[in-house]
Image: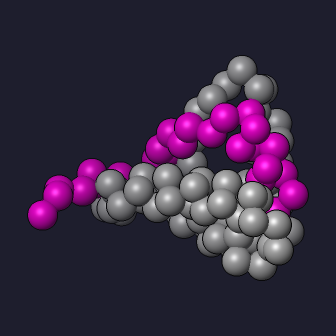
Amino acid sequence: MTMKIKMGPDQKVELKLTPAERKLMWGLILMDDEIGKRIRQVPPSDLQMGFTYDELNSLVVYVEAEAHTTEDDSYRKKLIGISVRIDRLIDKYTLM
């Protein structure tokens, strides 16, 4: 059993997203305005963004919902790849 890293509710974890991946996520229909705004405002040169545990859980839901509703196979595969990375990151942590 892998030990999970404990984190506080306001502590942020770094998620690495390429500029292309962030651009893909700009159009997520269901994404929370605050999270979407932060993703759009990060300069392209910054590959990492900080999210709280709850924000990561919300973000993965938005990405997976979009992946399961799109008819574009290429877009779907890219979103699933992002959601898998977010899920793996979430699995490393637990809230204190």
Q: Residue at x 36, y 61 (%)?
A: 91
Task: Answer with left or right where residue 85 lies relative to residue 65.
Answer: left
Task: Identify whether 11 is placed above or below 48.
Answer: below
Q: Residue at x 63, y 39 (%)?
A: 17
Q: Quadrant of the C terminus?
A: bottom left
Q: Nearer the viewer, residue 64 or 9?
A: 64
Task: Answer with left or right where residue 13 lies relative to residue 92.
Answer: right
Task: Identify whether 9 is placed above or below 50.
Answer: below
Q: Nearer the viewer, residue 90 or 54?
A: 90
Q: Nearer the viewer, residue 94 or 19?
A: 19
Q: What x and y, as percent, mark residue 82? A: 59, 54
Q: Is residue 81 magenta?
A: no
Q: Nearer the viewer, residue 1 or 42?
A: 1
Q: Residue at x 57, y 48 (%)?
A: 51
Q: Residue at x 84, y 51 (%)?
A: 26
Q: Is residue 23 magenta?
A: yes
Q: What x and y, as percent, mark residue 89? A: 42, 52
Residue ranking furthest to the top: 45
Q: Could you tell me if residue 39 is visible in this image?
A: yes
